[in-house]
Image (cartoon, rainbow, N blue to C red):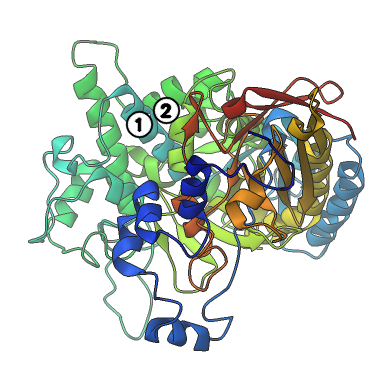
């Protein structure tokens, strides 16, 4: 049977295939192929012509966005990271350095350390101000550097959550385990189901924020007694004090209703971690006896975080930053109960090692597997503002990159009177921002956003150039019969990869799927494996229709298999100059011609 580059072979098999994918034929078959029972029940073929379709068409674009699914570029930064000397990065770093110096010069900041990190190390490091802002003798104030030690305050919670993930990986606990499995003395006034580990880590347990509460005897005339210990007039509690207080209160909200930030919740999570590890290693006499020992064994020591710990007495005191405000906070001992919520110290260099490990899991020191990190970097609750979300410890900020695509910063902030910190990860683009600060100026998000605003465009430019070098162009596989040749054109548009032409063994695949004479390109989405992509055909009758967005493309992510491979799979191999585009479903290797 003759093949032609102008269209698919007219055979019974191909007529069936076209009926399945080309509107408006054979809807039930389409639903069976895609296994989309939801679409079968909720969106019959008459939807676009019936009352619901009319109503959808009457909605404004802002209410019901009509959007295709512009998949982001693959995370090439994790595979081919830029360096501080990469084109565009150097200029952006100078601009960022100037902005941060201006922030410090404006007053209110004693010491500041900022880093932008990829899996390969720092892209930018800037250190400003003094270590000992409480000293009047200039010779004792010292200059901040990458090894200066800051109190992390609530950034500590990220380390506590990481320990929970490590224990989950080992099988010592499950996210669905009840707290009482590991902390038998825990109780709270509630007729709900038992609170579980996941709810603690995501602040959705409803646990009151700071237990025991301070004595607010002058309310409503005064705020005396509000807040966290010791600012509320009480000392840092022991574990038994926390548990005893909780037994007299009910959850702020029912579990899994809304996130309610809770230091006490993370105190409990620390108890859970230690209890789970004790049960897991019950036969070992030298197991960790404290939260600090557990994290030292499982995180700090394996990563070489030598300036990280929970006591100023075991760290180099000369390196510990002291603020001009509330300088006594430098020596706070949060004790065993509250160490998991805010007691840790660390440095820019040490947190950079942690960031590298999270950005490239499974490479080097293997604390968390790649799958565990992917599971961790997910929102659990979306707030009403369409700008912020929460996750398992994360305070997530949504923003847009250079092409208007949504990005997420997975963040954790820390605040004491004189210490202000932030740890932020962008897993989509493969970088982290670390901010450690002392002084009266409270907003550690401001220098974080300085770094993102300045360096994101430079990183975007690097990513676009790398993607163009590795994937875009015209790819061909010749044949003795020109009509049976293969020809693929891959282009870049607004931060996404697109296949504009796909002719395989003489068949126009896009024409077969979308209909002859229709100009249509198809997006390529990364599978998360280096150099491996799928074509995002979606479900043609619903692609770009109101109210569907990317969801419809996930429903249509699988068409079928040929020769043991997905028919929409494309794989690249080799270096930039000698690359091969392999289409496994037709056992073809195409080479770039320009």
Residue at 35% across / 35% down in the picture? 164
To which residue does mark 1 refer? 291
Marks 1,2: beta carbons within 8 A: yes
Question: Residue 570 falls in which quadrant of the image?
Answer: top right
Q: Residue at x 40, y 58 (%)?
A: 26
- Residue for point 14% across, 36% down: 181
> What residue is at 76 percent from the left and 58 percent from the top?
402
Q: Secondary structure at mark 1?
A: helix
Q: Secondary structure at mark 2?
A: helix
- The span from disc 1 to disc 2 (Cα, nearest Å) is 6 Å
Residue 266, x across and y down, in percent:
34, 47
Q: Is residue 413 left or right of residue 45?
A: right
Asked if 14 appears above or below 234 in the picture, the reply is above
| Rendered location of residue 317, percent (x, y) | 61, 32
In percent of width and height, residue 461 lies at 83, 48
The one of 370 and 51 positioned closer to us in this rendering: 51
Say which of 491 and 10 sits in front.
10
């Amino acid at each position: 049977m003759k093949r032609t580059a102008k269209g698919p072979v007219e055979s019974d098999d191909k007529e069936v295939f076209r009926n399945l994918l080309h509107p408006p034929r054979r809807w039930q078959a389409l639903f069976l192929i895609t296994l989309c029972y939801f679409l079968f029940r909720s969106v019959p073929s008459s939807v676009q012509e019936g009352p619901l379709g009319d109503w959808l068409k009457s909605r404004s674009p802002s209410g019901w966005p009509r959007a295709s699914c512009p998949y982001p570029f693959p995370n090439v930064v994790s595979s081919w990271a830029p360096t501080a000397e990469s084109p565009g990065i150097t200029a952006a770093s100078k601009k960022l350095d100037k902005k941060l110096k201006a922030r410090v010069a404006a007053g209110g900041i004693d010491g500041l350390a900022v880093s932008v990190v990829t899996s390969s190390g720092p892209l930018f490091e800037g250190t400003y101000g003094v270590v000992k802002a409480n000293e009047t003798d200039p010779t004792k104030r010292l200059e901040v550097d990458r090894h200066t030690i800051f109190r992390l305050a609530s950034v500590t919670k990220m380390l506590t959550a990481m320990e929970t993930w490590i224990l989950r990986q080992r099988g010592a606990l499950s996210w669905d385990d009840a707290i009482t499995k590991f902390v038998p003395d825990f109780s709270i006034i509630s007729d709900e189901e038992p609170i579980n580990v996941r709810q603690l880590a995501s602040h959705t347990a409803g646990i009151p924020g700071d237990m025991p509460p301070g004595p607010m005897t002058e309310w409503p005339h005064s705020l005396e007694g509000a807040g966290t210990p010791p600012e509320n007039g009480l000392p840092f509690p022991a574990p038994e004090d926390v548990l005893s207080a909780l037994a007299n209160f009910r959850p702020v909200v029912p579990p899994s209703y809304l996130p309610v930030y809770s230091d006490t919740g993370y105190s409990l999570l620390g108890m859970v971690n230690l209890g789970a590890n004790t049960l897991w290693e019950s036969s070992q006499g030298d197991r960790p006896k404290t939260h600090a020992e557990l994290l030292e064994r499982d995180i700090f020591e394996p990563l070489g975080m030598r300036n990280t710990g929970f006591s100023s007495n075991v760290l180099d005191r000369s390196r510990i930053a002291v603020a001009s405000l509330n300088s006594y906070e430098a020596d706070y001992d949060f004790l065993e109960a509250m160490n998991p919520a805010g007691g840790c110290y660390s440095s820019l260099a040490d947190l950079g090692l942690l960031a590298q490990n999270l950005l490239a899991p499974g490479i080097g020191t293997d604390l968390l597997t790649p799958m565990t990190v992917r599971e961790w970097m997910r929102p659990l609750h979306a707030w009403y503002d369409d700008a912020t979300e929460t996750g398992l410890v994360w305070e997530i900020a949504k923003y847009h990159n250079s092409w208007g695509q949504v990005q997420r910063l997975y963040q954790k902030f820390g605040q004491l009177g004189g210490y202000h910190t932030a740890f932020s990860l962008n897993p989509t683009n493969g970088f982290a921002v670390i901010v450690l600060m002392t002084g009266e100026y409270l907003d550690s998000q401001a220098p974080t956003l300085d770094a993102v605003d300045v360096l994101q465009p430079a990183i975007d430019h690097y990513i676009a150039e790398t993607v163009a070098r590795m994937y875009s162009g015209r790819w061909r596989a010749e044949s003795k019969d020109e009509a049976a040749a293969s020809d693929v054109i891959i282009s870049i548009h607004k931060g996404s990869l697109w296949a504009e032409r796909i002719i395989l063994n003489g068949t126009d695949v896009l024409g077969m799927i979308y209909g002859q004479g229709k100009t249509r390109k198809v997006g390529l989405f990364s599978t998360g494996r280096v150099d491996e992509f799928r074509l995002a055909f979606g479900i043609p009758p619903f692609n770009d229709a109101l109210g569907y967005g990317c969801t419809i493309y996930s429903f249509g992510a699988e068409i079928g298999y040929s020769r043991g491979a997905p028919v929409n799979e494309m794989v690249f191999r080799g270096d930039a100059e000698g690359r091969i585009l392999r289409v496994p479903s037709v056992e073809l290797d195409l080479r770039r011609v320009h």
